[in-house]
Image (spheres, rainbow, N blue to C red):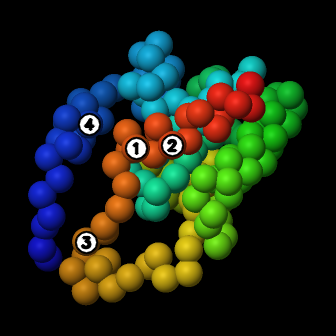
């Protein structure tokens, strides 16, 4: 396997392995939405960039309340959660014009959840041809946009919606 040097990720990776608390709860405690990459705050849920994006614009929606069970969340929270998914799709279509989306939740560690104790939804914009030979041949993923650029492109569109 070949490696591509990505020094900007070192600080985050070191923090994640040392962190005892949930990454979503930690992001909320920062009280700095830009630093935490939080794009939008609703009454019950928030929208945040994925620090390890599959494609540019890879977003996540998570509740403020630290819950592992979607079905035990209050109706008001899950209703807003659904509305925030609609908002994410609208903003991503406007800014990136993707050909489609993958959306989903991995509930529980056995289902592939990296953060199993705080449910969240992934919204991943997709384009025809965005999967190339790099992951197959060299086990390397290339993401064409830095998180700071993604944040600066999407943040104004989410602020318009407030």
Judging from the image, what secondary structure is the residue with disc 3 in? loop
Q: Mark 1 points at which residue?
A: 149
Task: Return the mark for residue 153.
Answer: 2
> Answer yes or no: do the residues labelled 2 and 4 have beta carbons within 8 Å?
no
State the residue at coordinates (49%, 22%): 33
| Nearer-N-terminus badge (1/4) | 4
State the residue at coordinates (29%, 80%): 134
State the residue at coordinates (74%, 51%): 90
Q: What is the C-alpha distance between the residues marked 2 and 1?
A: 6 Å
Q: Depth check: give the residue in front, 81 or 125.
A: 125
Vertical placement of residue 11 versus 35, above or below: below
| Nearer-N-terminus badge (3/4) | 4
Q: Name the residue under label 4.
A: 12
Picture coordinates of residue 127 (x, y %)?
Answer: 56, 74
Q: Name the residue under label 3.
A: 140
Q: Nearer the viewer, mark 2 or mark 3?
A: 2
């Amino acid at each position: 396997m070949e490696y591509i040097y990505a020094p900007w990720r070192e600080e985050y990776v070191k923090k994640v392995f040392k962190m005892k608390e949930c990454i979503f709860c930690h992001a909320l405690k920062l009280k700095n939405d830009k630093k935490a990459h939080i794009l939008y705050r609703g009454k019950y849920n928030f929208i945040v960039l994925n620090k390890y994006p599959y494609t540019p614009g890879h977003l996540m929606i998570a509740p403020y309340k630290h819950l592992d069970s979607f079905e035990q969340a209050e109706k008001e929270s899950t209703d807003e959660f659904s509305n925030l998914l609609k908002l994410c799709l609208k903003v991503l279509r406007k800014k990136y014009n993707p050909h489609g989306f993958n959306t989903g939740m991995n509930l529980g560690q056995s289902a592939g959840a990296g953060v199993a104790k705080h449910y969240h939804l992934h919204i991943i914009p997709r384009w025809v041809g965005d999967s190339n030979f790099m992951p197959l041949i060299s086990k390397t993923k290339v993401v064409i946009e830095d998180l700071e650029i993604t944040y600066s492109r999407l943040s104004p569109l989410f602020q318009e919606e407030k």
